[in-house]
Image (spheres, coloured by chain):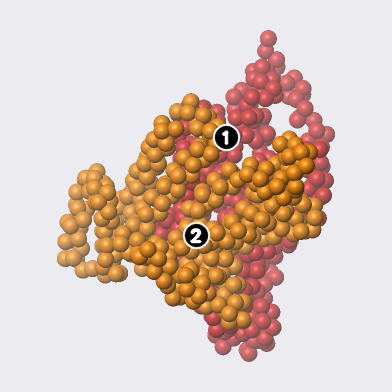
Amino acid sequence: MKVPAAIVEEALPDASPVAVQGPWRRFATEFAESRLALAGLALLAAIVIVAVAAPIVSPQNPYDLAQLDVLDSKLAPGEHSSSTGMTYWLGTDDQGRDMLSGILYGLRISLIVGASSTLIALALGLALGLTAAYFGGWVDTLVMRIADIQLSFPAILIALVLLALMGQGAGKIVAALVTVQWAYYARTVRSAALVERQKEYIEAARGLALSRARIVFRHLLPNCLPPLILVATVQVAHAISLEATLSFLGLGLPITEPSLGLLIANGFQYLLSGTYWISFYPGLALLATIVSINLVADQLRDVLNPRLRR
Amino acid sequence: MIGFTLRRLGQGLLVMAVMSTLVFVGVYAIGNPVELLVNPQADDAERARATAALGLDKPLTAQFATFVVRALQGDLGRSFVYNVPAIQLILDKLPATLELAAVATVIAIVIGIPLGLVAGLKPDSWLGRSIMAGSILGFSLPTFWVGLVLIMVFSVKLGWLPPNGRGETAMLLGVPVSFLTLDGLRHLAMPATNLALLKLSLLARLTRGGTREALLQDYVKFARAKGLTPGRVIGVHVLKNIMIPIVTVIGLELGSVIAYAVVTESIFAWPGSGKLLIDSINQLDRPVIVAYLLVTLAIFVTINFVVDVLYSFLDPRVRLAAAPAH
């Protein structure tokens, strides 16, 4: 007998609003148990807000050469501009650029590159991983072997090679980051999907004669998400760090709109003469971003792990 | 065991073949190969001569065959900048990189494993907690920035350690090494610490996890019940059992240490193959890039192969599980 879809919808627990509220509230409570993780989340929120609001909060537009004064170059933190009298709280670089503004704008670029490459890699990995798990056979073998081979080489090496071959640019660095990241998601979603596929609720959904697409997207996918969220959080931090490293090596973003890595690279040449702030403060901003994301990820790992569920 | 080893060897060679093909496609087929392989400063006549000499007027399959034959003979072209065979350039610089990687790995093992053990034995003490918090910092700190801070503190502010170079070297079996001279050690200290930091955090976390799991096992409880000293329980029963995954990870991470040496070598101007790679990329010295890639690939495939075989040797379950899958 075929059960009408409308009745099935009502019978499914995820259709009721109370059941949807429950897991989120529990999630929030469990996450808040670690004060360190909350501090990380607060720091991350603050960083994202100042990065988004950079054009409003930063003292100058660091990319507008007309606003830079070469006479103010390499001023120490706290010194004042000779022309406008503004205070450079974190000093200036060799072109007289206010480091605080440079850092705020650089954060923006680092976050955009990190987040967009993670999202694209997530989508790609999700699609390939689900395909591999669903079809099995040679499709599965092919996708997973490529992932295996790729994961046996360090991300930095693959990214370096790709950028050496393709040249520089924001799009290219995102492409390189996606290439090194997708395999983590594909592997995670595949193993989660293979476990979930065996469970009773999928059998029940099959028994109710739901369409394949509905089973995959409404039943299988949501249950594969927790490990993916965790991997994505860790990977955002990884992507930001990798982008900074590549930019530092001179293979990342163009010099006209520097990300944090490029700001640090730019200051490196003056480091030995004691002009530390050009490299140090962008590095501190980078560090704060990555540490805050990792603190959040560390707590997510405990909260999302079903084996530790109390 | 022999069947397993041969199968792994075959897989390794397959990976090598696939990756070489990708490198070939990347360098020769994408874009204009003449532009990629001929010195950009060359004039038209030289370009034509080079095109013919490199066989770039032939079909791609024929070019691939030539590339494979020459690569198998160890001929990967001559460096534009130094005008010596690219492979020789890499092999000259490789010992410096391997020395740096080896010293960094030793630092990571000698410090990381004891820290992880302490954190695993006393997970709720302030010491255990600070080790774990420190390890988060250890992974979060971007390698290049740690390098800068090290230079800033120890070279610029304190003036204790030299910021760049390899220092005085001594010959060991015909290879120059830094760790046998005092000056070399002073030069080695910062880059090796810098490179070790990430692996140190990883090993500490891994050891902690393994220790915590092992402590709950019956054999540890039994060893305690038998009245063995805590030192013996930890040193023999716990450590021995957590060593298999740790040794595997150390082996596998060796490749990643070599890759990250690119960053460390660039910061500390350590004259190894990683710095050569970055210099070559900046100078568009493509034969050297290709040579670096293929040499590194070979090192990686070898490491993975050795670790796989060792692992199956240490843990028979692996080769039993792997056998029916193929």
Horizontal placement of A45 versus B160: left or right?
right
Q: Secondary structure at mark 1?
A: helix
Amino acid type at mark 2: Ala
Badge 2: how crowded within 10 Å, few (<14), some, or many (20+)? Answer: some
Q: What residue is shown at x 69% (from left), y 69% (from top)? A: A56
Which colour denotes chain B? orange
Judge whether residue A236 can be spotted in this image: no
Task: Specify whether A162 is left or right of A54.
Answer: left
Residue to which mark 2 is pinned: B102
Q: CA distance from mark 2 to mark 1?
A: 36 Å
Q: Is residue B42 above or below residue B28?
A: below
Give percent across and percent down for residue A133. 55, 30
Q: Quadrant of the N terminus of chain B?
A: top left
Residue B315: quadrant of the picture: top right
Where is mark 1, residue-wise?
A190
* Label of residue B17 in the image: none
Q: Is residue B162 above or below residue B288?
A: below
Q: Which chain is red?
A: A
